[in-house]
Image (tube, grey):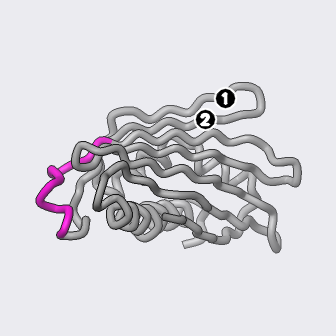
């Protein structure tokens, strides 16, 4: 299932990236999701910055058709590697993995922070896949909705607060 979200921020791409890769920010987003954090780290290797987040996310709000098969929490591992993209912005490769109903759910996205009108245009494009025969497409739609309507929305709200734009 395709993922396509665009937001704008009144801060330059370097400032937005600094917040997105800050461990305190990543923990705050997890708290907003009501998730239990197991690991948060940020590391730099040359020009690349990688964030790693492992958490146990609550399953409240999932579609009723899946609720009876899923426990109270789902283990989630997210890795994002950011590199400069050459136009004053940054490109991030996001890999998010979760186990839902004993099946792997995978979200792979490209994140871009590009200069725009004195600020930043932030885009997230990618795909959600769930390895589940018969209900895979429906589960992928639920994962996509969760990522776009909950995770990225909460991340956006926390980012606005951190940037002083809220």
Give percent across and percent down for residue 74: 26, 47
Magenta stretch contains residue 100 = no
Q: Which residue is mark 1?
A: 44
Q: From the viewer's perspective, is 71 left or right of 92?
A: left
Give percent across and percent down for residue 29: 42, 54
Q: Secondary structure at mark 2?
A: strand
Residue range (magenta): 65-75
The reply to whether residue 36 is visible in this rendering is no
Q: How many marks?
A: 2
Give percent across and percent down for residue 60: 21, 62
Q: From the viewer's perspective, is 7 left or right of 75?
A: right
Q: Secondary structure at mark 1?
A: strand
Q: Residue furthest left?
A: 68
Q: Which residue is mark 2?
A: 50
Magenta stretch contains residue 68 = yes
Is residue 60 placed above or below 84 in the rendered structure?
A: below
Q: Residue furthest front?
A: 134
Mark 2 and mark 1: span between their CA atoms? 6 Å
Q: Which residue is drawn at the image coordinates 33% and 67% (left, top)?
A: 138
Q: Which residue is drawn at the image coordinates 55% and 60% (left, top)?
A: 159
Q: Which residue is drawn at the image coordinates 58% and 68% (left, top)?
A: 4
Give percent across and percent down for residue 28: 42, 51
Category of crowding for the residue at label 1, using alpha-carbon neighbours closer than 10 angstroms: few (below 14), some (14–19), many (at least 20): few
Is residue 31 placed above or below 116 in the rendered structure?
A: above
Are circles 2 and 1 on residues that touch, CB within 8 Å? yes
Q: From the viewer's perspective, is 121 left or right of 131?
A: right
Q: Please tell me which residue lies in front, 159 or 54.
A: 54
Where is the C terminus found, in terms of image quarters? bottom right
Ranked by sequence position, the earlier of labels 2 and 1 is: 1
Q: Quadrant of residue 43?
A: top right
């Amino acid at each position: 299932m395709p993922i396509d979200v665009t937001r704008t921020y009144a801060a330059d791409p370097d400032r937005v990236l600094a917040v997105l890769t800050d461990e305190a920010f990543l923990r705050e987003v997890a708290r907003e999701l009501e998730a239990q954090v197991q690991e948060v780290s940020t590391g730099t290797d040359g020009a690349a910055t990688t964030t790693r987040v492992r958490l146990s996310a609550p399953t409240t709000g999932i579609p009723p058709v899946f609720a009876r098969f899923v426990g109270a929490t789902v283990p989630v591992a997210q890795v994002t590697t950011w590199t400069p993209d050459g136009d004053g912005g940054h490109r991030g490769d996001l890999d998010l993995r979760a186990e839902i109903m004993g099946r792997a759910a995978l979200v792979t996205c490209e994140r871009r922070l590009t200069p725009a009108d004195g600020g930043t245009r932030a885009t997230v494009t990618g795909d959600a896949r769930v390895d589940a025969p018969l209900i895979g497409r429906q589960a992928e739609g639920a994962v996509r909705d969760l990522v776009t309507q909950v995770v990225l929305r909460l991340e956006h709200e926390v980012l606005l607060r951190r940037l002083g734009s809220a």
